[in-house]
Image: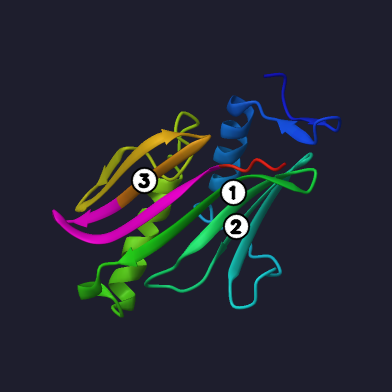
């Protein structure tokens, strides 16, 4: 692919998957994982983070804390071209334990900082630090995918989140 180009005759955007993957990595590390600054929400009641680079814009929008469903969208020149939805959070046994959840989310951010352009969805396939372990399984590629990430603490699952997404193709 030649890059991100508007093809007005066909009303499509040709997408360079490698450039999109590299952009997603920079965006994700600069927003939630990197403690990015929240922006004005387009969706009342949601927290939103944004990253812009040239004609590309990334927005992560989520609500909640212990369970926090959300959506990430990439736009090229204002037109949505890629999206990912996610849902999950703390295992029921650990919900409403704010201190413990804070530790889990801090570890989650460390895992998400290790996102790789070969699979720019969530974190790496595995990551360990002390008593914490992050595991992520994904099927598909940047065009169409689904997956599940888990965090274990001392070998016990304490967090689980499912996600899915891919390209947005209009008429």
Q: Is residue 8 above or below residue 35?
A: above
Q: Of discs 3 and 2, which sits in the foreground?
A: 3
Spatial CA distance of label 3 from label 2 is 24 Å
Q: Answer with mark 1 or mark 2, whichever residue precedes in sequence.
A: 1
- Residue ranking furthest to the right: 9
Query: In the image, residue 80 lies at what x, y percent?
Result: 69, 47
Residue 157 painted magenta: yes
Query: In the image, residue 72 lies at what x, y percent?
Result: 57, 53
Task: Work out which quarter of the rendered image holds the C terminus and state it.
Answer: top right
Instruction: Identify the disc placed on residue 36.
Output: 2
Please give the residue where the numbered disc 1 appears in the rendered image.
30
Task: Write the residue at 19% across / 53% down.
Answer: 131
Q: Is residue 110 left or right of residue 156?
A: right
| Marks 1 and 2 close (CB-CB < 8 Å) | yes
Spatial CA distance of label 1 from label 3 is 22 Å
Q: Answer with mark 3 or mark 2, whichever residue precedes in sequence.
A: 2
Q: Of discs 1 and 3, which sits in the foreground?
A: 3
Residue sitting nearer the eye, 150 or 138 = 138
Please give the residue where the numbered disc 3 appears in the rendered image.
147
Callout 1 secondary element: helix
Instruction: Identify the disc placed on residue 67.
Output: none
């Amino acid at each position: 692919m030649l890059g991100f180009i508007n093809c007005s005759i066909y009303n499509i955007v040709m997408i360079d998957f490698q450039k999109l993957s590299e952009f997603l990595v920079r965006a994700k590390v600069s927003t939630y994982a990197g403690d990015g600054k929240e922006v004005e929400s387009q969706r009342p009641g949601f927290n939103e983070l944004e990253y812009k680079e040239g004609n590309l814009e990334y927005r992560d929008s989520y609500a909640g804390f212990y369970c926090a469903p959300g959506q990430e969208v990439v736009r090229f020149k204002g037109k949505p071209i890629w999206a990912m939805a996610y849902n999950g959070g703390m295992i029921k046994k650990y919900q409403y334990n704010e201190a413990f959840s804070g530790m889990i989310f801090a570890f989650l951010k460390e895992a998400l900082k290790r996102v790789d352009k070969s699979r720019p969805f969530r974190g790496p396939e595995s990551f360990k630090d002390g008593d914490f372990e992050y595991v992520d399984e994904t099927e598909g590629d940047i065009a169409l995918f689904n997956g599940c990430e888990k965090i274990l603490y001392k070998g016990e699952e304490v967090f689980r989140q499912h996600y899915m997404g891919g390209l947005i193709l209009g008429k």
